Image: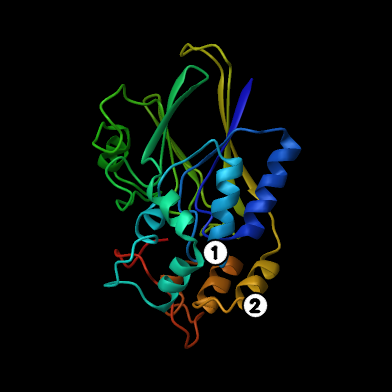
Amino acid sequence: MERCAVISDLHGNVTAFEAVLADLRRRGITTVYNLGDVAGKGPRGSECVRLSRLHCAVTVRGNWDDFLPTDTPEWRDEAGWWWHDELTPEDRRWLGTLPLCHDLRLGGRRVRLFHASARSVYHRVHARHTDEDFEGMFAPTGLTGAGPAPDVVCYGDIHDAFVSTVRSRTLVNVGSVGNPLDEPQASYVILEGDPRDDRGAAFGIQFVRVPYDIEAEIAVAASVGMPALEAYAIELRTAVYRGRHEDLGLLGASASGTTDPAKESP
């Protein structure tokens, strides 16, 4: 059987990323695909870029990879500029050149990888999706091209791992390595397939949760003076999205550090 890993949403969390890389080494998996959002929200985006370039066969562009390298000032707050400036000019250049989509074949299936949806890196499809949302993830678009429709789509963006199968098509959200918002452990997916290139070949999807030292990661963020530290720490400890912290009484006086133009992006 051939195996590969699909990871997403590192968000500058090197502690979680290194834990996942160690888990992959233990399993003997060397082919890794990254669904984007490498930097932002966490303190070490530049190091996540370096590790992604070193270990990932392909990294596709996420929404943070799309807007964080730019110098657009209209929506960026103090935290946004901090995450932008923490990246080197070469980091920003590389993020801006990432492809929007990648296709591969495994176990006789056509597998499509992108960050958020077939429409855009900014168009969100949640775990509780409509039939129209599901269909749209498999549709040809300017982002994905006009090739054959995929059998399996893997995406990230929502930081909420799930799998949904309808009429032989499977939609997989791989969760988040660095900023999970469903359970406070790093999440990724292993795809496994019979090397025979026909639809009757065996194919498997495995979700993996990896514990890591959350307090050590928060300590790194504090030591470098990262803005929006409180929101980051609460997210890592509780897996509750920062947009809900105030309503739930979790957030003190510090800013949430929202930098996404949509104002509600994980």
Quick one: 241 or 120, which is closer to the camera?
120
- Give me the disc on residue 107: none
Is 30 drawn above or below residue 168 in the view shown? below
Q: Residues within 10 Å of mark 1 (few under 14, many from 20)?
A: some
User: Residue 93's x, y, as percent?
Assistant: 41, 52
Give the amino acid at mark 1.
Ala
Q: Where's the C terminus, which quadrant?
A: bottom left
Which residue lies most toward the right here?
26
Residue at x-position 24% and y-position 36%: 142
Mark 2: secondary structure: helix
Q: Which residue is mark 2?
A: 223
Query: Disc 2 marks which amino acid?
Result: Ser
Q: Which residue in the protein does label 1 denote?
A: 239
The answer to whether 168 appears left or right of 212 in the picture is left
Give residue 208's quadrant in the image. top right
Q: Is residue 157 visible?
A: no
Circle 1 sits in a helix, a strand or a loop, which is it?
A: loop
Indicate the position of residue 24 as horizontal and vertical percent values: 68, 40
Contact between marks 1 and 2 (CB within 8 A): the answer is no
Q: Quadrant of the N terminus?
A: top right
